[in-house]
Amino acid sequence: MTLDELKFDERGLIPAVVQEADTGEVLMVAWMDRPALEATLATGLTHFWSRSRRGPWRKGEISGHAQHVQAVYADCDGDTLLVQVHQDGVACHTGNRTCFFTAVQGGTAGANMLERLERVVQARKTAPAAGSYVAGLLAKGEAAIARKIGEEASEVITAALGGEGDRRVVEEVADLWFHTIVLLGARGIPLRDILKELARRHQARTTPHA
């Protein structure tokens, strides 16, 4: 699809969904006018149009958190762009890896909680925040994280066998899962790899033998 075939709105803008090319994670949504899109394609760095400032801007020009473009796609209607990038640092001005870190209330409180924790760990790994427990643990290294996992596993066993009640078991398992996610983040292992392995094992155990 050519630029002439794209459908910019009455303001000359088109929404651009920015996605991390390696993980598929949605980082942000912004607007492009035609010059911004042309600059993005020409330079390999994302350029946008700011509706609030009414002017062009390049991602990372102030923060240094540039987005290196791998590919740009248009949807079937030609009125929305998908921009796949490799993100330097974090995408959100809040210091979070992605702008999509706030859950909308009304559904299940724990929905996608593991993925949300994973994003927090990624953000603290990329841009450590002062006073952050996760950032401090990551700074201590994998050995310290592994020791913490061992402590939490022991506490799960103690809670389960010590007659402390279900609530205590829930709390200790939550601690164990949390620190396990920190270890995965430290090693750069996506949570989806663990889920895929569990799915593979489940499939292997439920598939009838020929």
Image: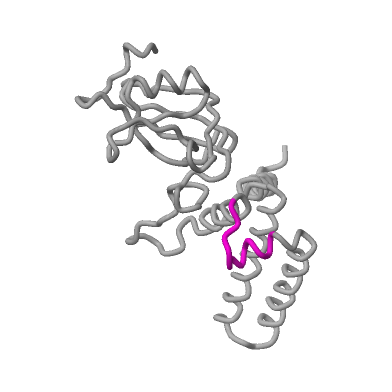
Give the x, y percent position of residue 44: 52, 23
Image-based side of 109 in relation to 43, left or right: left
Image-based side of 194 in relation to 143, left or right: left
Give the x, y percent position of residue 206: 65, 48
Image-based side of 58 in relation to 150, left or right: left
Vertical relation: 51 (above or below) 138: above
Which one is in front, 205 or 177? Answer: 177
Q: Which residues are magenta?
A: 127-138
What residue appears at the point 42 percent right and 64 percent down from the top-left corner?
A: 109
Give the x, y percent position of residue 130: 58, 64
What residue appears at the point 60 percent right and 35 percent down from the top-left corner?
A: 22
What residue appears at the point 38 percent right and 31 percent down from the top-left corner?
A: 48
Verify whether residue 84 appears in magenta.
no
Which one is in front, 55 or 83? Answer: 55
Q: Residue furthest front?
A: 62
What residue appears at the point 34 percent right and 61 percent down from the top-left corner?
A: 105
Give the x, y percent position of residue 57: 40, 33
Vertical relation: 203 (above or below) 169: above
Which one is in front, 11 or 72? Answer: 11
**Quadrant where the C terminus is found in the figure:** top right
Q: Residue furthest left?
A: 10
Colouring scheme applied when the structure was drawn: one colour
Number of numbered markers: 0
**Quadrant where the N terminus is found in the figure:** top left
Which one is in front, 120 or 161? Answer: 120
User: To which quarter of the image does residue 204 belong?
Assistant: top right
Verify whether residue 136 appears in magenta.
yes
Q: Residue furthest right?
A: 143
